[in-house]
Image (tube, grey):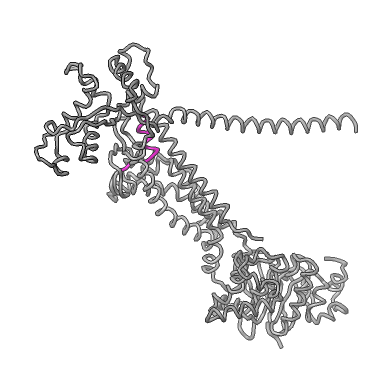
Amino acid sequence: MSKIKAENVNVYYGSKQALFDVSIDIAEKEVTALIGPSGCGKSTFLRCLNRMNDVIEICKVEGSIKMDNLELNSRKLDVVRLRENVGMVFQKPNPFPKTIYENVAYGPTIHGIAQSKEEMDQIVETSLKKAALWNEVKDRLDEIGTGLSGGQQQRLCIARAISVSPEVILMDEPCSALDPIATAQIEELIDDLKKEVTIVIVTHSMSQAARVSQKTGFFHLGKLIEFGPTDKIFKNPDNQQTQDYITGRFG
Amino acid sequence: MNSFKKNLLKKRYNAERRFQWYGKIAIGLALSFLAVFMFQIFSKGYSAFQKTWIVTEVHYDKELLLIDAESPSKDDLENADYYDVAYKAMTSLDPGLPEEEDRQLIQMVSYKYEAEVKDLLLKNPDYLGKIVPIKLTASDDVDQVHKGNYPRDIPEKNRRVNDYQLQIYDMLNERGDILSEFNISFFTSPDSREAELAGIASSFMGTVFSILVCLAFSFPVAVLAAIYLEEFAPKNKFTDFIEVNINNLAAVPSIVFGLLGLGVLLAVFNLPRSTPLVGGITLSLMTLPTIIIAARASLKAVPPSIREAALAMGASNMQTTMHHTVPLSMPGTLSGTIIGLAQALGETAPLILIGMVAFVNTIPGTPVDPAASLPVQIYIWSESAERGFVEKVSACIMVLLAFLILMNLAAQIVRHKFEKKWS
């Protein structure tokens, strides 16, 4: 079942066009990987899905992006509600310079999700458990989040993202700053999370896309070249460019 | 390696060595200027922290005091006539002196000696009728003689202390009746025309009130302006124009702000002249751009990833700013504020224009009482010819420097202690 349906999305940075007529169907409770060389527009597309492009003043988005029949690319959309439903994990771990507890509790606090302290404690614990971080930090929840290791920080960011129970989580190269062990942990986590959440992940690692995703989209020069089941894209792509990129002949 | 290459390498090393030497010489020069300056100030000023007293005996004679009552009340003592008692206390130092020459003795103590005689009795009512020793503030001339600042071997007519007075001074000094003690009154007295009585209490309080008023006006305005410009305002020609003008404002000579204070605060709003209120507002105009620039720089230094994290969690712009960006920028903003205030602390010209240069011999209790300020006090005293004021100028500079060093230290501590580290 389709969770997000994008049709003819064009994105401009000033006079420069970054995305050309991208149309894509993202299925519910699956992992969709977006791959492609640097500057191909995959991150730009990802940021359309939670309207993070609003921050960039010169950025203009055209076309239709629907999530459960809600038009995301509309002036009337309440971006605060949208971002409550669509969480995001960034390339570089960016926990707040506050305690681990405060990091996870921030979202529920500003959205008024927890009614009491007990409920909040529960949310923090569940989120950290889902992010596979609980056992490592349960005794030091009042320590500063930025004091954790890189991999732990990224899992803390994932815990923060899932604390408000979003329907979709966007991940922008979440493992590019991590070592292989931390990467493996995050990938395992993504596998667990997809039972409940729809995940869209941008990655530079071909093998990561192959491991974690069910669908893969290949972007090149702002165009979605090919989109389909991961198996097919990696084993038997229709397009020659996709074939070349995957086999490392350019990129 | 051929000789050409060797030469080139040698040249390069020599150039680096020369460059390092230039740097060392520059630092050495700067430090030696500072050392000379400090030495000047300290060697001239340290003696101002010593006060010279003349010890004599006073007889609290009821008849001379014109007290009739058997057991006089506090009011009786308050209203008694101390002129003769005080006069006698001084002239008793040399009973043989003809009456028409008595001024020579009276001039050796401060003109307030009568009040000092009175104060001692008011504090100790049981001295009434007794002969007790008393400390009187020496005149600034005797003070300077005692501190060794006046040469004694020049002709009498070129001296402010004549031969007779020197003779009395030597006699008293031999008896141990010239005392030198820590000068508390320098810190507790307001300004005076007499060097031996002048203190910095009025100007110190004036400075404190001015700085507080300046902080109260400039900090909220500057921080709000910086937050709006940095976090909310669209980036266009108009905001660029505002930014350029804020930077220009920081470079405007301070005397111009003084004229503004004179023309607007005093002439239009009729605020009380010579007060720390007006001084503080005028100084806040100067501090404003400094704080705005510091606050904007420290807002800019907050990594964008923190803003993105908050926005992606569904925080509004306002929440992102207030929950994350502003708290993280506070250490930088605060240390910028303290540095701005330290600049304002040393400012003289605008305060002179708004009338804080007036002679004030009361200690201000509120920001709307007339007051001087420390730098203006330095200016006022430096215009006086008496040797007594020369050391006071240096002493006042020392107090001002101590104040400045404390504030800069506070800025450093705020910056290092409260700055949060992010990965």
The image quadrant of residue A20 is bottom right
Please say if A62 is above or below B204: below
The image quadrant of residue B418 is bottom right
Please say if B239 is above or below A18: above
On whether residue B379 falls in the magenta region, the answer is: yes
Q: Residue furthest left?
A: B68
Which residues make up the magenta segment? B371-382
**Does residue B245 appear anywhere in the picture?**
no
**Does residue B50 appear anywhere in the picture?**
yes
Question: Which sits in the foreground, B124 or A31?
Answer: B124
Please say if B22 is above or below A43: above
Q: Is residue A34 left or right of residue B416?
A: right
Q: Main secondary structure of the magenta part?
A: helix
The image quadrant of residue A18 is bottom right
Q: Position of residue B179 (x, y in %)?
A: 35, 28
Question: Which sits in the foreground, A93 or B174?
Answer: B174
Q: Is residue B272 left or right of residue B341?
A: left
On whether residue B206 falls in the magenta region, the answer is: no
Q: Position of residue B113 (x, y in %)?
A: 24, 31
Question: Which sits in the foreground, A59 or B404?
Answer: B404
Q: Is residue B22 left or right of residue B328?
A: right
Q: Position of residue A29 (x, y in %)?
A: 72, 84
Q: Residue furthest bottom?
A: A1
**Residue ID at (78%, 79%):** A213
Give the quarter of the figure containing the C terminus of chain B: bottom right
Q: Is residue B118 left or right of residue A243?
A: left
**Residue ID at (64%, 85%):** A68
